[in-house]
Image (cartoon, rainbow, N blue to C red):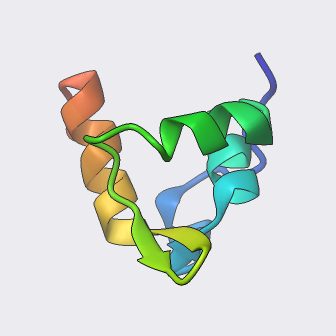
Amino acid sequence: MKESDYKSYEELPLFLNAKMVGQVLGAAPSSAYELMHESNFPVLKIGNRMVVPKEKFIEWVERSTGGDS
């Protein structure tokens, strides 16, 4: 597993693309892209582009881990 490029949620931009999601999770962009196609993952589609709102991403992480980091 790769180490995350981010050390806190405050460092994240308002919207994350697949590359950024991968960087945060310590995963490859291709794995993040697959995750972004999951039905329970908070994705906003803008034309062909998929982005993840920062706040929804944080909520997803907390729900998925059962914590409130």
In the visual, does 65 lie left or right of 2?
Answer: left
Q: Is residue 39 visible?
A: yes
Q: Residue furthest front?
A: 48
Q: Which quarter of the rendered picture does the N terminus lie within?
A: top right
**Residue at figure coordinates x 75%, y 36% from the top left:** 30
**Residue at figure coordinates x 19%, y 36% from the top left:** 63
Q: Nearer the viewer, residue 68 or 60?
A: 60
Q: Which quarter of the rendered picture does the C terminus lie within?
A: top left
Q: Residue 10, image x and y in percent?
A: 51, 70
Tell me where residue 4 sits by quadrant.
top right
Q: Nearer the viewer, residue 26 or 32?
A: 32
In the visual, does 53 lie left or right of 2?
Answer: left
Q: Is residue 69 visible?
A: no
Q: Nearer the viewer, residue 69 or 50?
A: 50
On screen, residue 53 above or below 4: below
Q: Residue 46, image x and y in percent?
A: 50, 83
**Residue at figure coordinates x 63%, y 40% from the top left:** 32
